[in-house]
Amino acid sequence: MTDNAAVGGGAVDRLELCAVMPVYNEEEIVGQVAESWLEVLDGLGINYELVAIVDGATDDSEQVLRAVAERHRRLVVDVKPNSGHGPTILRGYRRGADIADWVFQTDSDDEMPAASFGELWNLRHQADAVIGIRSSRNQSPGRRAITRAARFTARAAFGCRLADVNCPYRLMRSTALAPLLAPIPDDTFAPNVVLSGLLARSGARLAEVPVPHHDRTTGVVSILGWRALRAALRSFGQTVRLSRARIPKI
């Protein structure tokens, strides 16, 4: 970001925050979502970057975001071939840990509002990671079972007692996050579950904040039925394997 460059063309100053937003086929809503996040983050006076990572979208999500980026210099549009939600998040986390003091992740489907971010940001001096808890969330019985299985796995494998281990609304200090990213393979299906466990095991100070959750009004859920069950089993295996990783204590 050119406004952060040191006088004389030196090194770029470190940002306060890198907000990571994976995007896949959300053309109907993603422009509005990006605008809402830019408004909230600007209002908080944060030196930040919002990076929207387009994961091989087959609709006009990229074009919609580029139109927003022409008006908002803090929005970065990163386009890559499709690899899935988990690998896309990890790409953003690795970028964020390199350039900013804090890394935040949110999804692009408008299920969790930007307006709630200020509460997480205000807790940053008291914690190494602030994790959202999706409140008023409507889930099918299958999805509810997968959520409970993820929570049980994180507790059994890592001793993690977070209420919502896979919540896609989380703020993490880069000095706590960066060492935990090293052992996580790029193709990990549910990195947020793993990171919840690793953060707990590392001794990081964790805080939780309820965040309103709304049903999506546009787009479609990409993994349903048996695909969701297979994905959950894959995530379980990866989480258990990664629970054996050696990580430094904070």
Image: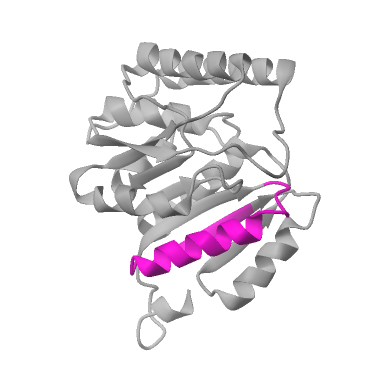
| Viewer-side residue, 174 vs 225 | 225
Q: Is residue 6 left or right of residue 240?
A: left
| Viewer-side residue, 183 vs 221 | 221
Image quarter (top left, top right, bottom left or bottom right) of the C terminus: top left
At 67% across and 68% down in the image, what residue appears?
A: 66
Q: Position of residue 236 (x, y in %)?
A: 53, 16
Q: Is residue 1 left or right of residue 119?
A: right
Residue extending furthest toward the bottom: 8
Q: Decide: is 28 above or below 2.
A: above
Q: Is residue 221 left or right of residue 167?
A: right
Q: Which quadrant of the structure image shows residue 198?
A: top left
Residue 141 visible in the shown view = yes
Residue extending furthest toward the left: 126
The part of the chain drawn in magenta is: 24-53
Q: Is residue 250 magenta?
A: no
Q: Is residue 51 magenta?
A: yes
Residue 47 visible in the shown view = no
Q: Decide: is 110 above or below 183.
A: below
Disc tally is 0
At 33% across and 69% down in the image, what residue appears?
A: 45
Q: Position of residue 214 (x, y in %)?
A: 54, 39
Q: Position of residue 219 (x, y in %)?
A: 72, 43
Q: Which quadrant of the structure image shows residue 7?
A: bottom left
At 57% across and 37% down in the image, what residue appears?
A: 186
At 64% across and 61% down in the image, what residue appears?
A: 31
